[in-house]
Structure formats: structure tokens, C-alpha cells
Amino acid sequence: MLDEKAKRTLLRNIPHPLNICGVKEGDDVNGFTLSWMTQASFKPPLIVIGVRQDSRSHAMIKASQVFAVSFLEVSQQDLAETFFKPQQRIGDKFGDVEFYLGEETGCPIIASALGFVECRVQGSLEEGDHSIFMGEVIAAGQHRDGQPLWMKDTPWNYGG
């Protein structure tokens, strides 16, 4: 028997970092709030992300086979919230948020983030309402030091 209340409570206790995932397809770029990510391997360095299958970003990752993750600081909750909704690109900004394109992937990287990783997709699994993309980290950079933003630092929850 599945106890819905217990399931929701327990799954919402899984720690979730909040970051911005930058994607591209051709010259088109996009970014979204990424709330599910984990490291899967040290050698080679692999991370795994979960992406809603019905999203534009999902289609862009499938087409380009690359993505970048910009790591947010605990004080950047407003930035995470900004990317809950699609943002209009104007030059090198999504609305008021400045970005630059990664050298390895061409995906957008948030300039004010703590740092970034750029990844090339090594595999995927499409089950349920999200797909899992495994990406090999092919570039990384740190902009500054700071404490990362976690879901527990916000009034939001994920899972369940």
C-alpha cells in the first residue's frame, strides 16, 4: 500500500540544489531553474539532471546534446524564481539577467553565478514526466566563493 502522505513527506526531504540550466539549439538559447541534479561519477566526471519532458529545454537538450549548469548562491533565490517562467533573450541578457556563452558548449552561463559546468550528454532515460540526462563535465569555472542555494533555503518544495 502506498501511503501518499508519507511518500510526499519523505520525497520532499531529499536535498535539492537550485541552479540555472542553460541550453541551446543552433543559435537559440534558453535557461530554466534546475532543481534536480547529482554527481554520478568521478572518472569521468558525470552529473545527472532531471528535465520535464514537455518543456522546450528538454527538446533543446535532445537536439544539441549539451547543457550548462550555473550554480546559484543562497542569496540568489530571486534569480532561481525568475527562471521558473520562460525569459526573453535580448542580446546577452535574459530579461535583466546577464549571461555569456560557454566556450565548449555554446550554452548560456549566468554571469553572477558562483560558477558553472558545461556538459556533453552521454546518455538519457525517458520515463515518467521527466527525463534524466547524464552529462560529462567538459568545462568548469568558478566566478567567486559563496554558499550554494538549496531548496530547503526557500519556501518551495519539490518531489512527492
Image (tube, rainbow, N blue to C red):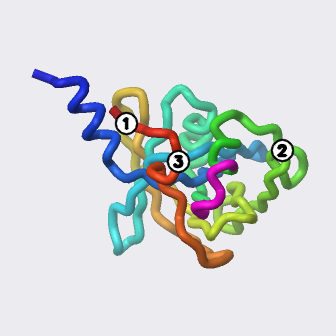
Q: Secondary structure at mark 3?
A: loop
Is residue 113 positioned above or below 133 on the image? Answer: below
Q: Which region is colored magenta?
A: 71-78
Q: Give the side of residue 121 with respect to residue 42, left or right.
A: right
The residue that label 2 is drawn on is 95
Residue 49 visible in the displayed image? no
Q: Give the side of residue 132 with respect to residue 32, left or right.
A: left
Identify the residue shown where x is 61% and y is 78%. 145
The residue that label 3 is drawn on is 154
The residue that label 1 is drawn on is 159
Looking at the picture, which amino acid does disc 1 mark?
Answer: Gly
Badges 2 and 1: C-beta atoms under 8 Å apart? no
Looking at the picture, which amino acid does disc 2 mark?
Answer: Gly
27 or 23, which lies in front? 23
Quadrant in which the C terminus appears: top left
Residue 105, located in which quarter of the rendered image?
bottom right
Q: Looking at the image, tell me whether mark 2 or mark 1 is earlier in sequence order.
A: 2
Give the Cα separation between the discs numbered 1 and 3. Answer: 14 Å
Q: Position of residue 152 (x, y in %)?
A: 44, 51
Give the Cα separation between the discs numbered 2 and 1. Answer: 29 Å
Q: Position of residue 130 (x, y in %)?
A: 43, 33
Identify the residue shown where x is 28% and y is 36%. 9
Looking at the picture, which amino acid does disc 3 mark?
Answer: Thr
